[in-house]
Amino acid sequence: MTEKRQEGADSADSVGSGFDLVRPTEEYSGLSRYAPQHQANEPMVLDHPTPDVSFHQGGWKGIDDPEAAPQPREGHQRSRSFPDASKGMDMTPMVDVTFLLLIFFMVTASFTLQKVLEQPHAKTDSIGKEDPLPPASDFVQVAIDPTNTYYVTTQDHQEIECPSESEMRARVKAGFASGHVDRLLVVAHVESLHSKVISAWDAGAINGASTIEIQTTDHSP
Amino acid sequence: MASDDNNSIQLPKRKRNPDDGELDITPMIDVTFLLLAFFVVVSKMDPQANVPLPLYNSGKSISEKTSVTLIVVLDKDNSERAMIYKGTMSDENLVPEGEEEEMEDNIAEFVENELFAYPTKDSIIIKAAGNCKTRTVELVKRGVGKSELARAEGRKLYIGIEEEQ
């Protein structure tokens, strides 16, 4: 380091005036390379007269500010995104796998709560024995045949075939809209599907039926 | 900066620029691992979850731990044959096929034993697949109805459903 400085000083002397560099002395050999040669506000002490050239007095650029970053070494470009070896390995794949696992367990989690629909206990006698129906003005009847077709009977005693579930729901809604009906009776054939019975039950619950009864029969409507 | 009395090299501190776009994601990873641990603990690989329950718009939720569960599904190889399981879906819990009366008695005995062994259970859930026949579901309901403990005060019968999205 000292040799380089001496070299530089020699070459500066050989070139001539204008560099205005201080010849290195022994007193600087123990200091850091970043140490300022002198205080910033103090003028430099020169051996020879200098031309009236304004230049930055003091240490190298940036070093006067104690908070400034160190200058990069000779030959290195200073860039904002040079890789930092101290950060270690890239965490991105680990985060990706963690999120995948999280999503997997969120989707597959089956909690111990079960959605249910309360129903009365079934009568222990055999199928086919039907209870006497309540007065016709009190209920809307939904019959389900073995082919899973709905038949809705409203207050006017007119049995209407409903090939689709949406039509059945619309008819039930219309039946309850009269305001005098609050009961739903579902008469399901034993060969009908369980899901159809639940859909009919659901139609009654949506329309505010206070009582919903299920009867099974082996007679087609 | 190095002092004249100190021979060790001290690098100047790097000032953190608040306008720098880097974001510390450590808290986010912590929360993610917490959520992951939670779902790993609470989830259970439950084959009963594969039962295609009928859809319903709204229903109440009850805990399966306080219920006696009966499962009705169709045989994969024979869609005409319904299989009734007492509790969990395993071969040893399968109700043997036979006369309806025998099957009802078998179900009644199971429900009676369960409610006797676990008095805190206050409900019976029938988880029947939507494609099961009404006949089968009614058979199971009659079997449950034959149990005196099931008909006791405070005990209710439920049909398992799936909430419509």
Image (cartoon, coloured by chain):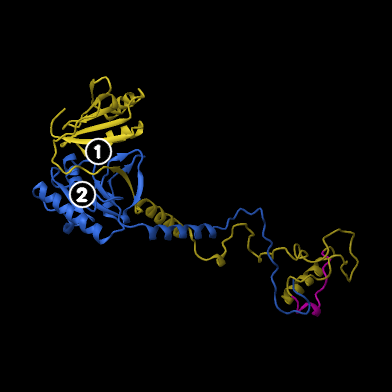
Chain colours: A yellow, B blue
Q: Is residue B120 above or below residue B157?
A: below
Which image quarter is the N terminus of chain A in? bottom right
Residue at left offset 83%, top offset 60%: A55
Q: Is residue B102 above or below residue A41?
A: above
Q: Chain of mark 1?
A: A
Question: Which residues are the magenta region?
Answer: A19-31
Which image quarter is the C terminus of chain A in? top left
**The residue under label 1 is which amino acid type?**
Ser
Query: Quick one: which residue is furthest to the left in this view?
Result: B99
Q: Which residue does the numbered mark 2 point to in the structure image?
A: B144
Q: Which residue does the numbered mark 1 point to in the structure image?
A: A195
Q: Is residue A92 left or right of residue A29?
A: left
Say which quarter of the image contains residue A189: top left
- Dot 2, crowdedness within 10 Å: few (<14), some or many (≥20)? many
Q: Is residue A22 magenta?
A: yes
Residue at left offset 14%, top offset 42%: A125
**The residue under label 2 is which amino acid type?**
Val
Q: Position of residue A29 (x, y in %)?
A: 76, 79
Q: Position of residue A132 (x, y in %)?
A: 19, 31
